[in-house]
Image: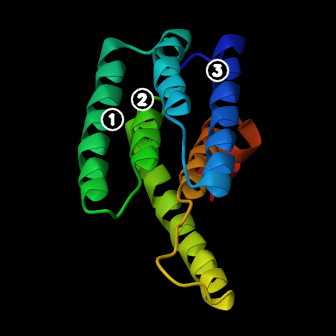
């Protein structure tokens, strides 16, 4: 993968978009469609800038399709929000397939911790009804971890050695 300035600029924009998704999900329990669309539409620029082959692009598209089908099923079961489904699908267009699986594991752990924290807060405040978990925070955090492990040399070295 090429590591030109334009590629790093696109990765930085993706990081900003992920932070925005986490913040809006925390505040409004919603990830805006325009943000997910911008992330997805930025992927082809990233593919070109990073010199990805048609095979690599095909893998991204295949993983994004599978991710959408799996997470849309969870949405249909009311186990996941629609914005979360779209954000994960858009991220699959950016992140290498194997790293995407690692990202999902980090997301699951972060999401579990987030669920425990928000559940405890819900109980402590004696609120009624279902707890609304801003899972976009876990998705964004895992996405940022993945980007850092791939594009920041010190983080990448620590990830590979440990």
Q: Nearer the viewer, residue 93 or 21?
A: 21
Q: CA distance from mark 2 to mark 1?
A: 6 Å
Q: Secondary structure at mark 3?
A: helix
Tell me what residue is drawn at x 69 percent, y 42 percent: 19
Q: Quadrant of residue 61?
A: top left
Mark 1 surroundings: few (<14), some (14-19) or many (≥20) residues within 10 A:
many
Q: Is residue 20 visible?
A: yes
Eyeballing the image, is 29 above or below 154? below
Tell me what residue is drawn at x 44 percent, y 33 percent: 90
Q: Quadrant of residue 89?
A: top left
Colour mapping used in the image: rainbow
Residue beneath disc 1: 64
Is label 2 in contact with label 1 (beta carbons under 8 Å)? yes
Is label 2 in contact with label 3 (beta carbons under 8 Å)? no
Q: CA distance from mark 3 to mark 1?
A: 19 Å
Q: Position of residue 32 (x, y in %)?
A: 54, 37
Q: Nearer the viewer, residue 94 or 81?
A: 81
Tell me what residue is drawn at x 30 percent, y 19 percent: 55
Residue beneath disc 2: 93
- Residue 60 lies left or right of residue 129; in this view the side is left
Q: CA distance from mark 2 to mark 3?
A: 13 Å
Which quadrant does the C terminus fall into?
bottom right
Residue beneath disc 3: 10
Tell me what residue is drawn at x 39 percent, y 46 percent: 85
Q: Position of residue 54 (x, y in %)?
A: 32, 13
Q: Which mark, by number, is residue 106?
A: none
**Dot 3 or dot 1, earlier in sequence:** 3
Q: Nearer the viewer, residue 113 or 59?
A: 113
Q: Secondary structure at mark 1?
A: helix
**Dot 2 or dot 3, earlier in sequence:** 3
């Amino acid at each position: 993968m090429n590591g030109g300035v334009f590629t790093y600029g696109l990765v930085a924009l993706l990081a900003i978009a992920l932070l925005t998704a986490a913040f809006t999900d925390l505040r409004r329990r919603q990830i805006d469609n325009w943000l997910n669309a911008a992330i997805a539409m930025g992927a082809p620029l990233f593919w070109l800038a990073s010199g990805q082959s048609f095979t690599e692009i095909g893998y991204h598209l295949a993983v994004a399709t599978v991710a959408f089908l799996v997470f849309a099923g969870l949405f249909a079961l009311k186990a996941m929000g629609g914005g979360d489904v779209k954000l994960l699908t858009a991220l699959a267009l950016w992140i290498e397939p194997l790293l995407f699986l690692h990202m999902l594991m980090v997301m699951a752990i972060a999401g579990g911790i987030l669920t425990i924290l928000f559940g405890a807060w819900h109980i402590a405040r004696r609120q009624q009804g279902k707890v609304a978990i801003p899972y976009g925070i876990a998705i964004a955090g895992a996405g940022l971890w993945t980007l850092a492990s791939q594009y920041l040399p010190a983080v990448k070295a620590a990830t590979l050695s440990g």
